[in-house]
Image: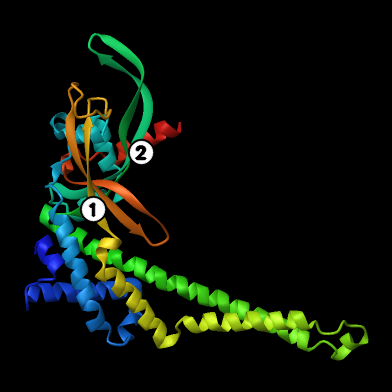
Amino acid sequence: MGILDWILGRRAAGNPAEEAGASEALERIIQLTNPRLQYARRFRPRLVPAVRTAMDYARSMLASVPPAREASTQAWQSDVYMRAFFATADDLVRAFSRSPELRAWFDANPAAQEVSVVLSMLLVERKMLGVVLVGSELQRDVPQITVSFTDYRARICGPSESGLRQDIERRIVDQLALPGMAKAMEDQSRREILEQERALLRARMRMLESQGAGLTALGGQPVDAEKFDRLHADLAVNEQNLKVLATGSEALDYQLEQIRQVLASPQEHFFLSSKRLRLNSMNIELHDDDPQPAVNLDLQLARVPMPDAPAEMRTFVLTRFPRNALLPRGALLSEAARLLG
């Protein structure tokens, strides 16, 4: 299905593979968020259309991602992307070899000679003053922007590029369910705070009402009518706020609705974008009219929603990493020992 089909809401009617995929995605989302959601009113017919929308959106996003690039010492020599991402070929190999997920995948697939893996990075652009050759003269203190890539992650692995893309699609749909559940949990936490507040207000009310009883009658102050009225007003507001928050089956319906809304509007919570950079051999950004030798990089960026933190914007590329490039664990331990020593 293309992006136009997604926008217009067209889909293949009665496609068994799509129906099975939507059902599988629904079960994953229920288990990932709250298994009790299956007891919510009409949970399946309410969620399935939104799940399909999220699946179509994820598929359309992945269709725009370029084919996988080889990540190896040899590729670093010739691939301008790998040379921009890593200062040296050894840095490339170390970045992939340090991934526990990648190593675990090779351990679990001893016959595989390479792995398809998503490499994600943080793109860092720094402003600085540099030296530029203009004609035959050097100009100093020229504003420049240097580009570097850090925080390499190679965690999502697969046996092939097609299998990797399918896995990413599933992960996008699963990730979209989390912000909806987080919103529902925020309301649950607010309810707990309001219930604690209500208990405190009622306790203070009882204390005021009991003035004059017991030994306090020997020398206590008369009831403060203004304070008493203020507590009554605060308690009324508290009760009203609690009424807004659902409980029991209503809470399940509310949680389901929050997840449904996110899945039905995935473009508001997850998107891919592109960024073109023109870099020289030192990873310094150049203008289009700059005569220096340069390469153009078309980067893919993903805004990743995080349930408990601001969304991250990361550069990513699909890659193929060969088993024979994987550094032995002993080499990594020796390097770590040298750094610590």
Q: Which residue is mark 2?
A: 333
Mark 2 and mark 1: span between their CA atoms? 37 Å
- Locate the C terminus by quadrant: top left
Q: Is residue 263 left or right of residue 235?
A: left
Relative to 170, say whether 155 is above or below. Answer: above
Determine the residue positioned at 35% across, 51% down.
312
Q: Is residue 336 left or right of residue 289?
A: right
Residue type of the residue flagged with mark 2: Leu
Query: Circle 1 sits in a helix, a strand or a loop, which is it?
Result: strand
Query: Circle 2 sits in a helix, a strand or a loop, which is it?
Result: helix
The crowding category of the residue bearing disc 2, from other C-alpha atoms within 10 Å (few below 14, some 14 to 19, many at least 20), is few
Q: Position of residue 78 (x, y in %)?
A: 13, 30
Determine the residue positioned at 30% across, 36% down.
331
Whether residue 212 appears in this view of the structure is: yes
Relative to 60, say whether 252 is above or below. Answer: below
Whether residue 199 appears in this view of the structure is: no
Looking at the picture, the colour scheme in use is rainbow
Determine the residue positioned at 31% across, 87% down.
41
Instruction: Check residue 272 in the rendering and tell me which mark sits there, or answer none.
Output: 1
Relative depth, front residue between 99 and 290: 290
Q: Earlier in the sequence, mark 2 or mark 1?
A: 1
Q: Position of residue 155 (x, y in %)?
A: 27, 51
- Locate the N terminus by quadrant: bottom left
Q: Are marks 2 and 1 in contact (CB under 8 Å)?
A: no
Relative depth, front residue between 75 and 312: 312
Quadrant housing residue 73: top left
Relative depth, front residue between 91 and 150: 150
Q: Position of residue 181 (x, y in %)?
A: 37, 71
Residue type of the residue flagged with mark 1: Leu
Q: Is residue 62 left or right of residue 228?
A: left
